[in-house]
Each structure stands twice: as C-alpha cells, then as structure tokens.
C-alpha cells in the first residue's frame, strides 16, 4: 500500500450562528463533525453525498481554506495545523483546488496567461521568461491552444474555462488537488472531456485527487476509494468496487438505489427513501440518519455509531452485516 | 387509433438578435398519445426549453413563433386569442419549472398562488378553492397541508417547493403536463421521490406528459418515447428502449457513450470533440456536422431530413449508424 500523503483525525468544522446586540454565539452549524480519513499518494478519494452533507466544507478544511474547529491534519508527515506565515505558504504550493463554477472562479479582468501565471508569481518560481514559457506548456497540456494566452475568460465556453482552472491548479506541480464538483456545471458531452483530462494528468504528473461530487456515476468512474457523507459525518468508506457491490450503510444503499440508470427502459419507480436531510444546526441524536432509516432500531436514536469495520471497508451503523448475501447473489 | 393529445407540426421559433435571426426551434414535429410520456433530451441551448415555452406561448420579445401548429386535443393553440390561451394555460395544459424558488412568487403564500389559479379556472368560491388547494397539497405528500397553505415559498425546502409546484400545476385537472427539468435542482434521493410522485399522479389522472431533461438516466426511466434535440432540431425519435439500445444518430450514440455508466468500467470515456455551437453560428447543413465522426460532404451543405428507418424510429442523418 502506498504512502500516506494526508491524514486527518477527528476534524470538526462548526460555523457559529450569532444573534443579538452582542452577537453572542447562540448555536452552530456542524458542517463537518468528527471526520477522520487518510489519503494515499496517487489515489483518487471520492467524497460523495447530498447538498449540505459537508463534503465541500471538508475539502476546504483539509487544505485550511477554513480553519478547523478541532482535530489534527498531517500533510507529508508534518503537522499542517501548526504551520504559519511563510512555512504555511510554502506548504500550500503542494495543494491546489479546482472549483465547481468556472464562471465564478476565474477573474474576468485577467487574461488566461495572467491567470495561469499568478500562482508562479505568488510563489516566485523561476524567472519571468521561464514563467511565460511554463504558461504556454500548461496551456497545451490541458488541451487549449497557445493563441489563447492573451484572451479573457468570457471568450471561452464552460469546458474550456474548466481547462484554464485545471492549468492554474497544476502550475506549481502540486501533489494534492481538491476537485470540488469539477464537472457538475458542464454539459454531458463536455463532462467526459474534463474527466478524461483529469485522469490523463493524474497519470502524467502522479497527482493525488480528493474528488467531491454528488453524482455517483461520476464518482464511480473516477475514484479508487469512496467516502459517503451524511450530515457532516462519514457514514461509510470503502474501495470503489467493494462499496458498489456491497454497500453496508442503509444510506449508501438508498443513494445507489436512487441513481437513474440508462437503458433499462421505463420502470415503475420503487419506493424511495422518505423524508429529507435534517438541519445540521440541530441534528437528530444518536445516528443522524435514523429518522429516515428503514432499518432503525432503538439504539440508533440514542447512541452515535462509530465508523468501524475490518480492513478497508468501514461503516458507521449499528446494523449487523446481514444484508450482504442477497446483494451478492444479484450481481 | 385515437387522435394524439398533443401534435406539434413544423414548429419554428425565432429570436431576433443583434447577430441576426436565431432559429432556436427549427422545424420540430412530434406527437404524444394519451397517458404517454415523451422525454425530450439535449444539452444546453438545444432548444428543448424553448420548445416547451412555445407550446405554452410564453415566448417573449425578441422571440416569436414564426411557423407551425400546436394541436392540443385537436385545437391549434397558435391560432387562439390571448384570453382564450389564458384559459388553456394552467387549465388544460400545465407546466412545472426547474427552479421552484424562481417560479413561485416569494411575497405571496402558497395558498394565495394556488387560489388565484383555481378560482380563475374552476370559477369557484374562495372557500371551495381553499379546500381544493389543501386537498392537492395533501395529494402530493406535503405534511400538514393546512399550515403549508399559509406558508411562503422560502419556508419550504427544495423538495417540498417542487411538490407545491406540482400541486399547483395539477390543481385544475390538466390533460397535458409539461415538466421542464423538474428534478435538476434536487438531490438524488429527493429526485427519486419527485419522479415517483409524477408517475403516480400521471397514472391516477391519465395525464399526458412532456418531460424535459439533460439527464439520460432520468429520461430513460420515466419516458415511453424519447426525442433527442441538437441545435434547435430533432436528431432522433424512438421508443425509449429502442433509442438507448440501438441509437442510430451519431450524436445520440456519442451522448450515451460519453456518460459514465453505472456498473460499467471503462478507463476513458468516449468524448464528443469540440463544444455545442452557439445558436447564431450553427452550420448551414446538419447542426452536428463539425463534431461528427461520420460526416460526409453532403452533411455540410444540406440539412438531413427526418427519415423513418424503422416503424416508430426516425433519424435525421445522411449517414446513420
């Protein structure tokens, strides 16, 4: 098993809600609540879940775009939360981010060349001539043309803009890239181009990805390991094939069951998961999924299940591992 | 065979822009039989939404419906006076929109907005209208409908808002429902709930549905027939199963194979090179010609007509698969 690049232990990110004249903290949104995970060199770790489950907050907290409320993060064997000032800036070179909306994440007043050059300017890499040379290399690497260097973002389509974001993200040769819903805003025919590009770059540049998406088909295609999140917690984590063949947590099972599939013909929708995601300000006690869970037991309403399991497949659920025999038979 | 509930013939909608006239919908024809669901699928800018807005006659300047017929239960909607059309909208024909937050009025209660429509079409008293509205809210699975009747849209979650929109759309017993990307803004588990709801109500009221989406998975599970659009034109039309298992238009085939398929592992996805052309720079011939791997000389000069290559399966391509 390859080397661990990032390890997070018991990460919490709570956003305070302040009210009144003195802005006292009256409550907090528990966006990420006690999450632990490791990311190995060269792999793609998927974070999947519905809106508000904390997947984007977790991604941003891992690279300290948000300061975690509690927990530990180790990056390349070093305590990442202790770093300050110059040493933090140096470390940040190794981690980059690609955002969902390529219309909002590129400065409309900068040319493509300036956008891609900016990380190198900030980190003072090479001479100006070398930087410009590198910009041209990057532009070609992500499938744009050298002639595009002096144009502005509004002249490009969504897919091309996402290529610019990718060029900017890889400009400093990072080790880890957080891809936050990188294809959700794109048309189907363009999504495939960007997913292929990310895969090619990963092989060429030995990149590690944390890939955040709500789309299970995209996650299944892209990721080696997958963590399923619900209301700020990881409810199940496993290798891709294992997770899809043998989902253990009732929420994962419902999520997989809810994916519309192509080419199976019109069908009667089966009974879907009822209810909605509760508020993260005041999550239900015990297992946060229990109000919607079809297999709920008495214990679920009072005690929080820990994320545990033999080997790489872990789940946070009180249910015994019983449902697997029928699932396996059907595959 | 009975007459179809909806028949669209040679529909053409043009927008007059500074860059010249843009044909957002170009010579589109289709029909839907009673109780059936037609799925219209395509990427952004393919004309699928403009087609639906044209049926409702909701096209505003600089847009104009420049040709064609829209026959709803045998009556041509494009020939109706505006006040007759108002009777049809929300009455015989209703529509659900993608973003319930923008489609609902934020400063009026759900109840007020429903009453407005019910009283107009049913010509009933406020009391009867309120009863009807609450009954509809209950039918779409909204808990404590009496309270929700008094709620404002922002007090409801996304899934609940979409349910309220469906309740509103169905409150005057439409025979024909247009659903324009009704689940795109929703999470997958909520999407499954809403699709299930639409199917159940369709069966209950024997409704005819036109369902628009860019999601191939959704379309494949909810429609009886599918129409694929590209650049304002119809590429292909067939029964759902036939279309997905046996696509003949190169665009349909490429679209299906570029989508990661659940449970099917490929190292690389098939792609369609280039991007969707802007509507004002569509090629003269087939709109897909510049991205097509099977294009021939003919394709650049002439528009391929829609040919029936099998009973019920039509394709607009000179060189189909």
Image: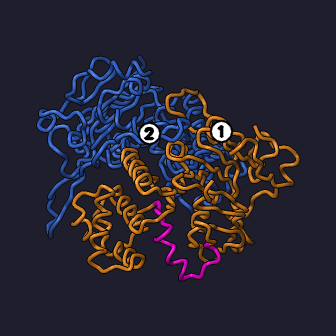
Q: Chain of mark 2?
A: A
User: Which residue is at the front of the view, A8 or A330?
Assistant: A330
Task: Please give the name of the residue rendered at 35% of the width and 27% of the height, measured from the top-left corner.
Answer: A247
Q: What is the crowding at mark 1: few (fewer than 14 residues within 10 Å), some, or many (at least 20)?
A: many
Separation of residues labelled 1 and 2 (CA atoms): 22 Å
Task: Please give the name of the residue rendered at 49% of the width and 58% of the height, measured from the top-left corner.
Answer: B179
**Residue B39 position within the rendered picture, expressed as x and y whole percent measured from the top left:** 56, 51
Which image quarter is the C terminus of chain B in? top right
Which mark is on residue A259?
2
SS at badge 2: loop
Q: Chain of mark 1?
A: B
Residue range highlighted in magenta? B77-98
Image: A145 above or below A236:
below
Q: Quadrant of residue A249?
A: top left
Which mark is on residue B271?
1
SS at badge 1: loop
**Residue B168 position within the rendered picture, expressed as x and y whole percent measured from the top left:** 38, 66
Among the chains pictured, the one given blue colouring is A
User: Which residue is at the front of the view, B312 or B44?
Assistant: B312
**Residue B187 position within the rendered picture, expressed as x and y whole percent measured from the top left:** 39, 48
**Labels 1, 2: one chain:** no
User: Which residue is at the front of the view, A236 or B24?
Assistant: B24
Q: How many marks?
A: 2
Please name the color used to draw chain B: orange
Residue A34, visible in the rendered structure: yes
Q: Nearer the viewer, mark 1 or mark 2?
A: 2
Residue A116, visible in the rendered structure: no
Residue B82 is a magenta residue? yes
* Residue A60 appears left or right of A276: right
**Residue B278 position within the rendered picture, expressed as x and y whole percent measured from the top left:** 69, 59
Task: Please give the name of the residue rendered at 42% of the width and 22% of the height, measured from the top-left corner.
Answer: A330
Task: Please give the name of the residue rendered at 14% of the width and 38% of the height, measured from the top-left corner.
Answer: A301
């Amino acid at each position: 098993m390859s080397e661990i690049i990032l390890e997070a232990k018991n990460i919490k990110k709570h956003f305070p809600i302040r009210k009144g004249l003195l802005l006292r903290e009256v409550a907090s949104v528990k966006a990420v609540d006690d999450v632990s995970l490791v990311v190995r060199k060269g792999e793609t770790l998927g974070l999947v879940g519905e809106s508000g489950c904390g997947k984007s907050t977790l991604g941003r907290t891992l690279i300290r775009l948000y300061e975690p409320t509690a927990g530990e993060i180790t990056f390349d064997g070093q305590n990442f939360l202790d770093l300050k000032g110059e040493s933090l800036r140096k470390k940040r070179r190794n981690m980059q981010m690609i955002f969902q909306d390529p219309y909002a994440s590129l400065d409309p007043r900068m040319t493509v060349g300036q956008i891609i050059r900016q990380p190198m300017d900030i980190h003072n890499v090479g001479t100006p001539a070398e930087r410009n040379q590198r910009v041209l290399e990057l532009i070609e690497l992500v499938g744009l043309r050298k002639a595009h260097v002096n144009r502005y973002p509004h002249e490009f389509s969504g897919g091309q803009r996402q290529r610019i974001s990718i060029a900017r993200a890889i400009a400093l040769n990072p080790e880890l890239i957080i891809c936050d819903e990188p294809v959700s805003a794109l048309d189907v025919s363009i999504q495939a181009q960007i997913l292929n590009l990310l895969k090619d770059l990963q092989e060429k540049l030995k990149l590690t990805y944390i890939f955040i998406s709500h789309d299970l088909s995209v996650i299944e295609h892209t990721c080696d390991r997958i963590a399923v999140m619900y209301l700020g917690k990881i409810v199940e984590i496993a290798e891709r094939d294992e997770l899809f063949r043998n989902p253990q947590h009732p929420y994962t099972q419902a999520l997989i069951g809810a994916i519309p599939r192509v080419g199976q013909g019109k069908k009667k929708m089966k009974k879907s998961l009822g209810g909605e995601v509760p508020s993260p300000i005041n999550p239900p006690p015990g297992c946060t999924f229990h109000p919607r869970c079809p297999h709920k037991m008495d214990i679920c309403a009072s005690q929080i299940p820990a994320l545990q399991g033999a080997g790489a497949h872990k789940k946070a659920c009180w249910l015994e591992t019983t449902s697997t025999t029928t699932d396996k038979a059907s595959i | 065979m009975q007459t179809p509930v909806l028949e669209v013939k040679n529909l053409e909608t043009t927008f007059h822009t500074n860059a010249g006239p843009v044909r957002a919908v170009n010579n589109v024809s289709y029909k839907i039989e009673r109780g059936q669901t037609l799925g219209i699928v395509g990427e952004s800018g393919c004309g699928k939404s403009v087609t639906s807005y044209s049926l409702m006659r909701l096209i505003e300047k600089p847009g104009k419906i420049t040709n064609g017929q829209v026959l709803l239960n045998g009556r041509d909607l494009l020939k109706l006076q505006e006040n007759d059309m108002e009777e049809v909208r929300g009455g015989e024909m209703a529509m659900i929109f993608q973003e319930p937050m923008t489609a609902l009025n934020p400063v009026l209660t759900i109840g007020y907005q429903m009453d407005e429509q019910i009283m107009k079409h049913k010509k009933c008293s406020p009391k009867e209208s309120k009863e009807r509205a609450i009954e509809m809210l209950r039918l779409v699975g909204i808990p404590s409908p009496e309270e929700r009747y008094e709620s404002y849209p922002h007090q409801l979650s996304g899934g609940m808002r979409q349910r309220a929109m469906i309740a509103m759309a169905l409150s005057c017993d439409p025979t024909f429902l247009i659903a324009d990307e009704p689940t795109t803004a929703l999470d997958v588990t909520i999407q499954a709930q809403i699709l299930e709801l639409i199917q159940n109500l369709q069966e209950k009221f024997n409704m005819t549905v036109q369902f628009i989406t860019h999601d191939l998975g959704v379309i494949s599970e909810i429609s009886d027939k599918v129409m694929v659009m590209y650049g304002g034109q119809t590429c292909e039309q067939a029964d759902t199963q036939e279309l997905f298992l046996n696509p003949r238009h190169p665009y349909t085939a490429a679209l299906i194979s570029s989508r990661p398929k659940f449970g099917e592992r490929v190292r690389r996805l098939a792609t369609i090179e280039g991007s969707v052309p802007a509507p004002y720079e569509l090629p003269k011939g087939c709109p897909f010609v510049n991205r097509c791997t099977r294009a021939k000389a003919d394709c650049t000069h002439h528009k391929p007509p829609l040919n029936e290559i099998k009973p019920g399966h039509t394709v607009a391509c000179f060189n189909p698969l």
